[in-house]
Amino acid sequence: MSDRKNARRWDVGGQPGAGTDPAADLAPTAARILEASKRLLDEKGFTGLTFEAISAESGENRASIRYHFGNKAGLIEALADSVVHDDNVALLRRLSEPGTTDRVGMLLTMHRRTTKSLQGYRRFWDLFPHLIRDAELQPRMADLYQWYRDLDEWALAPDADVALKRELDPLCAITVAVCDGLAEQIAADPDFDVDAVFDYWAAVVRELRDRAFRAAGYDPGAPAGDPVTTAAEPTSDGAAGD
């Protein structure tokens, strides 16, 4: 993983990644500019994100926008971070709380909440075509999706080693894709019963998580938050050893 990617991923309470929460370091002026940009994105879409409009909406001059974000690409990158910021950082903090037991349940509860938050998704959908077509911004999209997968993996197995991570990688890619796909269906049909889907999906995730643990040689029933425990080796008669 590149130094750039590690430097950009968020770290709240020590998990996961090697960077810091980007919003925590924003100067008040930069925060005002970013909030003004969100309002313009909601009202006018991507085409409304001109420096002139942002300056008028935020009350800050164009030089200040360039000082804090460099150029429009830098501003769009910050917007992409901020769209998913609150829900993901909230999940990190909740999973880091002492006594957390049902990590899978907490992860899926947050996924359900995020999927229903269409304002955030609409912002993301407005930005997405430009992020993947811009040679400077496309790697940032890859970084963000890697971070989503890393977050889900950490939620499912906080102390996973390389072998377990390898088994969990496909599941985490699917959990991210399911959230995106369900949000699209909610946007298309407000009466879509996403809660029924999540009730079903929870059982699937738990089963696939346990399968990944067993495939890596670990006990899926180990207490959440404890180091993953190698399953007992079978004895010659097929029973678990002492």
Image (cartoon, rainbow, N blue to C red):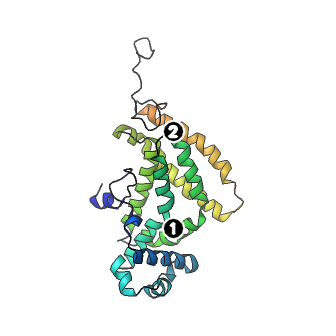
Horizontal and vertical percent for residue 118?
60, 65
Earlier-in-chain disc, 2 versus 1: 2
How many discs mark residues in the rendered view? 2
Cα–Cα span, label 2 and label 1: 31 Å
Type of residue at label 1?
Phe
Q: Which is more toward the observer, 41 or 234?
A: 41
Horizontal and vertical percent for residue 78?
41, 70
Does dot 2 land on a helix, a strand or a loop? loop
Q: Which residue is mark 1?
A: 124
Residue that appears at 38% across and 51% down: 16
Type of residue at label 2?
Thr
Q: Which is more toward the observer, 60 or 212?
A: 60
Residue 168 image-quadrant placement? top left
In the image, is residue 144 above or below residue 66?
A: above
Residue that appears at 35% across and 71% down: 136
User: How many residues crowd mark 2 within 10 Å: few (<14), some (14–19), many (20+)?
Assistant: few
Q: Which quadrant is home to the C terminus?
A: top left
Q: Residue lying furthest left in this view? A: 3
In the image, is residue 53 above or below residue 228?
A: below
Does dot 1 land on a helix, a strand or a loop? helix
Residue that appears at 65% across and 61% down: 186
For residue 47, the mark is none
For residue 101, the mark is 2
User: How many residues crowd mark 1 within 10 Å: few (<14), some (14–19), many (20+)?
Assistant: some
In the image, is residue 108 above or below residue 131?
A: above
